[in-house]
Image (cartoon, rainbow, N blue to C red):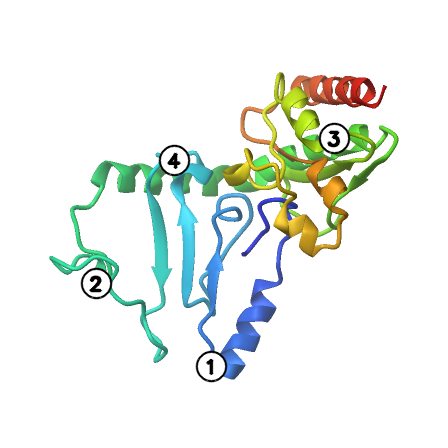
Amino acid sequence: MWANNETGIIHPIEEIANLCEDRNLILITDAVQAAGKIPVSTSGIHLMAISSHKLYGPKGIGALYVRHNHELPKPLAQIHGGGHEKGIRSGTLNVPGIVGFGRAAELRMEEMNEEANRLQKLRDRLQEGLLKISGTQLNGSQDNRLPHVCNIAFSGVEGEELLKRVNQKVAVSSGSACTSISPKPSHVLKAMGLDPDLGRASIRFSLGRKTSEDEILQTIDWVEKVVKELRE
């Protein structure tokens, strides 16, 4: 992953690419969470996946970058037929989705830096307020993170009940948004050495283009109220 979707940690892709190049290895990166939020590059990458909906484009459309000017093997055909997409995936193309995806990417490039600065300030304000609640901790490093994500652990509460209560007013997830209904502790937090109970009582907060400062303050108040009630 270029950047982790649960903690926001950005991985050293350039260093990894250099290691792979030295050893003649194929490097595949999931850049879905990073593209449009931070600068990404195909330099040294053999395969890179990105998704439109993360750029505020149409849902159901994505892209796979394939490095063709390299001797290492390319993907085998996923769907056979008319030979579309250089023989990798045949079938009628979703032209409106592709056009919308392209336009969304253009818009994100235009505003990415400014929006990243805005979101980082809001994220830091949210994080600062939540960490004032006793028995909380930040999961992951303070540094080298996506500007819009933070993951906070709340000790002394039952994770599933915490998530249900917070979600009454604020849309959050435990772990990735893709597995938000799973009661199991996040495999990412588990791999980081977090206690399973604390992992289940961890919440991923993700900000976006429409997130306002008022919403940040309301979220801090609401989460503090929920945690206090659950601990009583």
- Say what secondary structure mark 4 lies in: loop
Q: Amino acid at mark 2?
A: Lys
Marks 1 and 2 close (CB-CB < 8 Å): no
Q: Residues within 10 Å of mark 3 (few under 14, many from 20)?
A: some
Query: Which amino acid type is marked by label 3?
Result: Glu
> For residue 24, which numbered disc appears in the image?
1
Are the two marked residues, 1 and 3, in contact with CB atoms closer than 8 angstroms?
A: no
Q: Give the residue pinned by disc 4.
A: 57
Q: Residues within 10 Å of mark 1 (few under 14, many from 20)?
A: few
Q: Of tags 3 and 2, which is closer to the observer?
A: 3
Using the image as rendered, state which of residue 21 and residue 187 is in the foreground. Answer: 187
Front-most of 112 and 229? 229
**Count of numbered labels shown in the rendering:** 4
Question: Relative to residue 178, is residue 132 drawn left or right?
Answer: right
Q: Residue at image x 17%, y 57%? A: 84
Which tag, 1 or 3, sits closer to the chain's start? 1
Q: Could you tell me which secondary element the residue under label 2 belongs to?
A: helix
How far separated are the C-alphas under marks 3 and 4?
36 Å
Q: Counting residues from the N terminus, which is met first, the one under dot 1 or under dot 4?
A: 1
Report the Cα–Cα distance between label 4 and label 2: 24 Å
Q: Which residue is mark 3?
A: 158
